[in-house]
Amino acid sequence: MAKIRMGMVGGGEGAFIGTIHRMAAAIDGEIELVCGAFSSDPARSQRSGAALHLPAERVYTDFQTMMTAEAALPPELRMQFVAIVTPNHMHFPVAEAALRAGFHVLSDKPATLNLNEALQLKELVAETGLLYGLTHTYNGYPLVKEARERISRGDLGKVRKVVVEYPQGWLADRQEDTGNKQASWRLDPKQAGISSCMGDIGVHASNLAEYVSGLQISSLCSDLTAFVEGRELDDDGSVLLRFDGGARGVLHASQVCAGEENGLRIRVYGEHGGLEWAQQEPNTLWLKWPDRPTEMLRAGGGYLGALAAANTRTPMGHPEGYLEAFANLYMAFAGQIRASEADIPLDARSADCPGIDEAVRGMTFIELAVAASNSDVKWHPFPKH
Amino acid sequence: MAKIRMGMVGGGEGAFIGTIHRMAAAIDGEIELVCGAFSSDPARSQRSGAALHLPAERVYTDFQTMMTAEAALPPELRMQFVAIVTPNHMHFPVAEAALRAGFHVLSDKPATLNLNEALQLKELVAETGLLYGLTHTYNGYPLVKEARERISRGDLGKVRKVVVEYPQGWLADRQEDTGNKQASWRLDPKQAGISSCMGDIGVHASNLAEYVSGLQISSLCSDLTAFVEGRELDDDGSVLLRFDGGARGVLHASQVCAGEENGLRIRVYGEHGGLEWAQQEPNTLWLKWPDRPTEMLRAGGGYLGALAAANTRTPMGHPEGYLEAFANLYMAFAGQIRASEADIPLDARSADCPGIDEAVRGMTFIELAVAASNSDVKWHPFPKH
Amino acid sequence: MAKIRMGMVGGGEGAFIGTIHRMAAAIDGEIELVCGAFSSDPARSQRSGAALHLPAERVYTDFQTMMTAEAALPPELRMQFVAIVTPNHMHFPVAEAALRAGFHVLSDKPATLNLNEALQLKELVAETGLLYGLTHTYNGYPLVKEARERISRGDLGKVRKVVVEYPQGWLADRQEDTGNKQASWRLDPKQAGISSCMGDIGVHASNLAEYVSGLQISSLCSDLTAFVEGRELDDDGSVLLRFDGGARGVLHASQVCAGEENGLRIRVYGEHGGLEWAQQEPNTLWLKWPDRPTEMLRAGGGYLGALAAANTRTPMGHPEGYLEAFANLYMAFAGQIRASEADIPLDARSADCPGIDEAVRGMTFIELAVAASNSDVKWHPFPKH
Amino acid sequence: MAKIRMGMVGGGEGAFIGTIHRMAAAIDGEIELVCGAFSSDPARSQRSGAALHLPAERVYTDFQTMMTAEAALPPELRMQFVAIVTPNHMHFPVAEAALRAGFHVLSDKPATLNLNEALQLKELVAETGLLYGLTHTYNGYPLVKEARERISRGDLGKVRKVVVEYPQGWLADRQEDTGNKQASWRLDPKQAGISSCMGDIGVHASNLAEYVSGLQISSLCSDLTAFVEGRELDDDGSVLLRFDGGARGVLHASQVCAGEENGLRIRVYGEHGGLEWAQQEPNTLWLKWPDRPTEMLRAGGGYLGALAAANTRTPMGHPEGYLEAFANLYMAFAGQIRASEADIPLDARSADCPGIDEAVRGMTFIELAVAASNSDVKWHPFPKH
């Protein structure tokens, strides 16, 4: 059995998220990068490919060429899926081209530039019958999976309250004027879409809230703003949430909380207890009880569920991090590809990867959070597509 | 120079907050409990007084009797101020009686049963020229004072974002059915007023947000609820905040976050940095910076400001807690009494105690949070009285 | 029933530990400071007494005068016990005078200047039948008591390993040259005895190790040093420990761990689990298990034992600290006095205060640690007196 | 430029450390596993190789065959270095065979079964002129490198005290009777050597102490034991340390601290400040100062030195862990190979990998700690080879 063959679009020299994707794909030795169109600048794409030890003929000048050329290769050589790691505005065109050329797609988030594209993508996925995965990284952490499982099996009782927050500080000043590429495109509506803060990190928070709680947001009320002068897109926002079944919540996210790093954190409270998980200390999950000591669950603990265990590589006390969480999504997606090719049912680990439904809900969240913020009406129902 | 003489209304056998007040008043050896009306049940009041080593003749059957009898004593014997530690509905009547009888008042929060009473109280304080203090305990912590000072002197730059939260879990089930006295009155509109969660702890959070940030809330949008069936008053709520000058914020508080203790926590972010303080680890203040290491300030540190230092009793690493924070308010109020009697200016430490203005703003917050939650209108301006 | 009447020797203006003792004694309203000899400088003693609101006639110029004068007062007025808060070299003379004059003694630690005095003191206590307490403060924390109870009832199985550490940094440079009074006497053999680090804090650590584990040290091997030039006494030391029954341990303490505050911390491991407690976060006790989640116990938790509960004043999440731990020792000692006067059996809370046996073991530890450090022999048996 | 080609000895199905090595080698896409002798059981070796997607002809039945066969391949195909991930007793034979066959060696620790082998290995490395690396994983963490650099450049002043500890709990009961392979060989003198606890983790602690402090241990005093009945090798030990230049220290390590995970932690104190790092929260480094706030340095911080930065893959707040630390050693070793082949000087990152000198010091430490524990003499000088 050979490794799964991956192509990549985006992620050339100096890119942040492309390197992350490649490391995550490499860790477990199950996926091989075989080709790429790493930059719209052909020389840069070639240099990037060479640095990645790829043969020159598998490094393409643009993604359309890549799709055509790879599709023309013998099946046992050509890539099996495309990892999309471009800025947001290219997600949909690349995904569309890949699906139409017969390749599975694993895309960085948010899925598309806007909701309309996400809905088109959903149709295309259904039409082609191909696989689509979305890298909501934080779902990949084993203790996030444990949190979901504990709630799902009822340990906390009926969920009442969800508090999810995502403070960052990297845009507290005008990074976009300093040549910071990330900052430039994330604050540019043409490349990022209608939101910076909600589009980049708010959507992670809303996805995490739904993934962990097992509930869907039913309506929201929001207050977004751009604190730093001259920005067209929000760099901060707070959102009141209501969920199906009566739970309520708060989501706040910011790119201007000066001094914060990557502070994604979630707390969920049910009738009988609560839980808390924070991305910066991802190997710990807190369970809180009214009448007995708080429990500190740790990655690798023998008492964890099967899904957490399957997504852990090291024994207790040997910390795993962001790359391993990312790798868990890659492993799930690789498992989906193998199951699809072998025409066998998905195992639980492989099934557990965000897909096209999360893509659509994410884009819905972003557009609704922006619309609600601009409105004097308090509550805005969350459309189900 | 003698100790300051205190009388107490409420706080009989088994009461929570009365005992706290007495310990806080006692720590520094500057205040002496000389009399009390500890319960509306005369026998219980007498038993309570005896357990406190008070002479029987200074233990009263009701607060009116106490005011009259004490006022009739020679000035050097009679109490100088009344500590009010009853349920909310008695705060105003007792305060009114005390002020009219010529006694200063130090009251537990919230100041009154409703805003109307608070406004009356404000007039009465002005009229009598007597002192009025309000025990927003958390202001008493030295590192809360340091946080306020650092922001006030501009270390963080202009404030943009305030996140204040106050999760508790003690009312996650129907404690009011178990004989829990606290639970019973706090959920009873006749004794507690129109809010349980906002009235008991949300008001601490809004006070802390304003105290630390130095800003006033200008409008809010809120979503309160009672998660536990059968409750007339809210046991949970989330509030979007806007402040004078453009800062924004989130306040969330709950009595049903099962497994939480007393999780008051505040984070403030300005243009140049952020800070964080949590009540459960009160001797630590975090300063966060975009370009240099996060700093952990500790109570007792030689680098702290004068106000923090003046409110600290022990060297670094010898933790102080809730009672000492409370005691700081008592010491400030005692300082006000001494200054008033000596007709000298207030020192900074003595001046730093919440008073009638905070009383009015607190009651305004409670009423507005409830009204806003019941409204379909998104933003509700915060009235200035 | 009246308050217990306390006299104090030492603790004049500017003293650290005297103020701590007075606050601790005052918190619960059960003990009243009635007299004192606060300084060997009569004017300073009088100024100190006046600041404490004592009548001039109960402020004495020296401790001998105090003993005589108080003994001459009517029983219902005179002090019932003496709190000794002087430098070490005065502990024994004052305790001796107090006991001979018929007063109970509550002494700061270490008990005496040397072991010989401690043994004399033990005889005197036995002879007079009076009460003797020793303020090993850290025993007073409720979660230290809980730790002891959990081990005592076998939750961890047979104890194997004890790790106790006490890093401080306040003597990392020559504080003794700066006018720092504490530093001066603690590094002066005439006032402090033969050890600074072991005598001041190592002895707290050894006491805590024995109190929590329920085991006695049977032999030790030590390495003490003075890192800062010119010091006659140790400012740092590490000690290997063996306990009765086969457990082993490590104790390290330092006054020159620059940047440390008051880092007393203990970990005990048995066959089935471990526990950890740290003085700087005293309201948390960790229980660690091989096969289930680590438990975080919190002061005020309903699941704690009776002794922890009896030594807690506030609900969960309302932190108590160093003064309250100290106050717990005062309350226990006050309980011993009341039981002694009423000739009734001691309740568990009152019994739980270090006494003359701990005094002797502490002085033995200090002398042995110093002797062992100076020896080429590895193991030194711990004498039982 | 092609990837570096790695062969592996050991690490077949079910092995712990072999999988870790492979993941670490894979993360950065610079090293390719091309062959292996994964087990002494040929069928198991083949199954392991197949699962790793290796061609059958590069999977060998034993390490001697592998050395011969690989040496016979064309230079551009054959492996460039061997990763040794067997139990300890095989480290030397495999390393010897590899070096004699002309291959560089990257070995798991401890380097050999005993000191004598390590000294032979040192000669062999010198003789062959080949590269030798030793995976003291914890050196690979960026903040450990930062700690070393801060001390090396004098931030803390002259080092006085080193406290290093390594509590684990996985051998608190007789795991060796349960079929736990790790437990079986680590407690078997024939496979593990003369020590279990010191040989497996004590040696990590001593290495870390020397790496971070920049000092060498000059003598020690130790107390090892086997707490669990029937064990021939130590499962716990405490060691007093003295360093060249006058610093002192404590090292304690255990495999029977029930409930502990992998608690390696180091604190170093100098004249002007201290630092602390703990492996379970590896992305944080604490700097402690007597007169200003404690600083929390975080991986990815722009204020960190070049070596820390070069060993970090993700932005601040995106945690890296154990595998990435391991990968840093692999990247350094790969850099050494590239520099060696290109005959260019080593860059700082590549130079920073433990080698044959650390191998010899590690084996010296293990043998000395055991000998000292068995001796009545207190201090044992640390031989320099």
Image: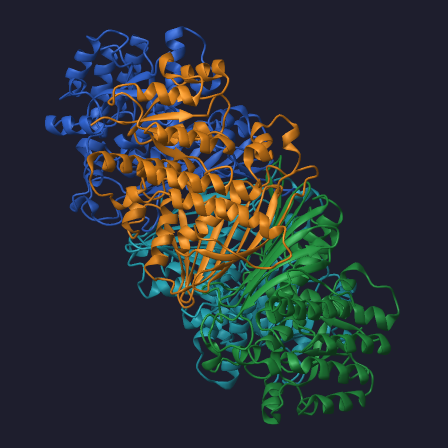
Chain colours: A green, B orange, C blue, D cyan
Q: Is there any visible trace of residue D234 in the rendered image?
A: no
Q: Is residue B106 left or right of residue A319?
A: left
Quadrant placement of the C terminus of chain D: bottom left
Of residues B245 and B14, the one drawn nearer to the viewer in this rendering: B245
Vertically, is C78 above or below A72? above
Of residues B328 and C270, the one drawn nearer to the viewer in this rendering: B328
Image coordinates for residue A163, horizontal then vertical, percent: 61, 54
Q: Which residue is drawn at 63% across and 31% down?
A: B176
Q: Residue at x 29, y 14 (%)?
A: C80
Of residues D140 and A147, the one drawn nearer to the viewer in this rendering: A147
Vertically, is D379 above or below A100? above
Image coordinates for residue A201, horizontal then vertical, percent: 60, 67
Vertically, is B7 above or below B161? above
Quadrant placement of the N terminus of chain D: bottom right
Name the quadrant containing residue C287: top right
Name the quadrant containing residue D25: bottom right
Q: Is there any visible trace of residue C92 in the rendered image?
A: yes
Q: How many numbered marks, from 0 up?
A: 0
Image coordinates for residue B259, horizontal then vertical, percent: 60, 41
Q: In this view, does B375 lie to the left or right of C148?
A: right
Q: In this view, does B284 lie to the left or right of D179?
A: left
Q: Residue at x 66, y 34 (%)?
A: B174
Name the outermost residue toward the right. Answer: A343
Image coordinates for residue B331, horizontal then vertical, percent: 31, 36
Name the quadrant containing residue B196: top right
